[in-house]
Image (spheres, rainbow, N blue to C red):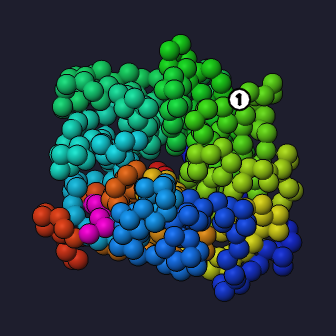
């Protein structure tokens, strides 16, 4: 069986005139989500009233600390919103400092849920796990099994014991990361258990682009280029659900919240879909969200079962509320332009097209999504109240957007090539970016680090002669 990748051009509507908008369009956002974002990321009313008699003006960290010590608010401590506001003023924009420097492209960088571990995935067959609490020392060095081209995704179980990694194949492998073996060579020094997602009905060996653990750690869900979503029961050691979800590659799938009942998916057919596993018709979506004009590369849930964001090859991030979803797909004709994001630049005439049936709450523009499935995320709830959206970019930068205003508040520059992934520490103002220049680097809120900062000019470009046919 030969592996193949299906190409699909997401549809735009036939009403091209109404699809166009201008580069100076005003940012618009739903009033409710704007209010909720500010509520979680700005000083609470009691704190503001005690310091500035309720006036809507910035409050310095010093002023807030002084007010807390004198108990101006009457509660003797910061509220969670106060903490988010104080910490959110100190973004991880200083640096960078080197975490690792490899001779192959870095595809993935992800913190564990408690922030103690950082996982880096590289093209070829390499995964490294770093101890973030011990000066980024290598905790486990993993050489993977039966990889096709690169690590496409990783997922750490909720108890942080098992690491699942996927590639451009229908098999996900699992490694016990708590095992004492530091050098983990697949099935030589440690068993890498293979979970098979294909079946006899598959006409080709499909690729897995996205993998996630359920919140109880009992299941894995994957999205693949067989246009489907698969759910694997780890205890039963078999695929228990196989949903033909989209009409093109499923590049992203994730759980909506802690219950693991609702799933979000995004595809090269330009659609986001919502799935409820409690419904009788479990193979049919409960809703569709239209608005993107091209393939979706990543989805991140806000964790509340209501809001999520998606990154897209139409060079935008969109914010969604599933309460606005429709039950059917709006009829659209194929797009009026042809391009391939793996090796072409995005058509300038299409940059400000707008879908006439756009159901998103807001659209964020400025970053670039080319050549690979670039990822975006909400900033941590503990330290920022999810006030920001951050994303990698093919223009070698990390972008921070303000959810409430849509503005680019920071842009991190140092890398010499595409930044596919980045990860913000769940509690500290530290961000790690991973780039095709082979570097994992970290950004901090201050320059008080004793290690030497990386200098401009040290970065390198992507190796020449790269084959684009398998880029993801």
Percent coordinates x, y for residue 202 in the rendering: 62, 28
Furthest residue in direction top, as rendered:
236
Question: Tag count in the figure?
Answer: 1
Say what secondary structure mark 1 lies in.
loop
- Left or right of residue 12, residue 198 in this image: left
The answer to whether residue 290 of the structure is visible from this angle is: yes
Crowding at dot 1, Cα within 10 Å, few <14 / some 14-19 / many 20+, comes out as: some
Q: Nearer the viewer, residue 192 or 65?
A: 65
Quadrant in which residue 36 is drawn: bottom right
Residue in view at x 30 percent, y 64 percent: 443
Residue receiving disc 1? 277
Residue in view at x 19 percent, y 74 percent: 455
In the depicted structure, whether residue 306 falls above or below residue 62: above
In the depicted structure, whether residue 102 falls above or below residue 327: below
- Left or right of residue 100, residue 36 in this image: right
Percent coordinates x, y for residue 206 in the rendering: 55, 36
Magenta span contains residue 256: no
Q: Nearer the viewer, residue 385 or 130?
A: 385
- Left or right of residue 72, residue 459 in this image: left
Looking at the rendering, the stretch of residues picked out in magenta corresponds to 441-446
Percent coordinates x, y for residue 207 in the rendering: 52, 39
The answer to whether residue 423 of the structure is visible from this angle is: no
Residue in view at x 37 percent, y 52 percent: 427
Q: Nearer the viewer, residue 388 or 460?
A: 388
Quadrant in which residue 131 is drawn: top left
Q: Nearer the viewer, residue 144 or 409?
A: 409
């Amino acid at each position: 069986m030969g592996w193949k990748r299906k190409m699909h051009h997401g549809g735009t509507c036939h009403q091209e005139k109404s699809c166009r908008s201008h580069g100076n369009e005003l940012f618009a956002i739903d009033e409710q989500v704007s209010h909720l974002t500010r509520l979680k990321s700005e000083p609470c009313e009691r704190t503001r009233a005690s310091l500035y008699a309720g006036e809507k003006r910035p409050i310095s960290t010093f002023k807030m600390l002084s007010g807390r010590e004198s108990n101006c608010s009457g509660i003797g401590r910061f509220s969670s919103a106060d903490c988010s506001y104080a910490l959110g003023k100190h973004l991880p924009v200083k640096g960078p400092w080197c975490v690792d420097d490899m001779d192959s492209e870095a595809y993935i960088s992800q913190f564990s849920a408690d922030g103690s571990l950082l996982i880096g995935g590289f093209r070829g067959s390499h995964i490294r796990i770093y101890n973030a609490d011990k000066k980024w020392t290598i905790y486990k060095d993993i050489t993977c099994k039966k990889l096709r081209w690169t690590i496409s995704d990783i997922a750490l179980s909720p108890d942080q014991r098992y690491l699942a990694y996927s590639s451009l194949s229908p098999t996900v492998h699992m490694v016990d990361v708590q095992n004492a073996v530091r050098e983990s060579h697949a099935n030589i020094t440690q068993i890498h258990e293979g979970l098979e997602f294909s079946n006899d009905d598959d006409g080709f060996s499909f690729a897995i682009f996205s993998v996630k653990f359920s919140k109880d750690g009992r299941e894995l869900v994957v999205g693949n280029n067989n246009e489907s979503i698969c759910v694997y029961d780890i205890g039963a050691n078999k695929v228990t659900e196989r949903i033909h979800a989209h009409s093109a590659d499923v590049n992203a799938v994730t759980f909506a919240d802690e219950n693991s009942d609702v799933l979000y998916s995004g595809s090269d057919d330009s659609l986001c879909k919502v799935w409820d596993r409690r419904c009788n018709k479990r193979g049919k979506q409960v809703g569709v969200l239209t608005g993107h004009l091209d393939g979706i590369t990543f989805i991140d849930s806000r964790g509340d079962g209501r809001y999520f964001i998606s990154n897209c090859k139409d060079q935008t991030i969109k914010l969604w509320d599933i309460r606005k979803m429709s039950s059917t797909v709006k009829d659209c004709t194929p797009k009026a332009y042809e391009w391939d994001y793996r090796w072409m630049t995005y058509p300038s005439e299409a940059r400000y097209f707008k879908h006439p049936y756009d159901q998103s709450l807001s659209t964020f523009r400025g970053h670039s999504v080319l050549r690979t499935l670039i990822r975006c995320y909400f900033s941590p709830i503990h330290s920022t109240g999810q006030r920001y959206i951050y994303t990698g970019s093919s223009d070698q930068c990390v972008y921070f957007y303000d959810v409430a205003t849509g503005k680019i508040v920071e842009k991190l520059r140092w890398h010499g090539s595409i930044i596919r992934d980045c990860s913000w520490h769940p509690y500290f103002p530290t961000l790690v970016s991973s780039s095709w220049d082979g570097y994992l680097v970290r950004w901090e809120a201050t320059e008080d680090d004793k290690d030497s900062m990386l200098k401009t000019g040290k970065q390198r470009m992507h190796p020449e002669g790269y084959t684009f046919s398998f880029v993801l």
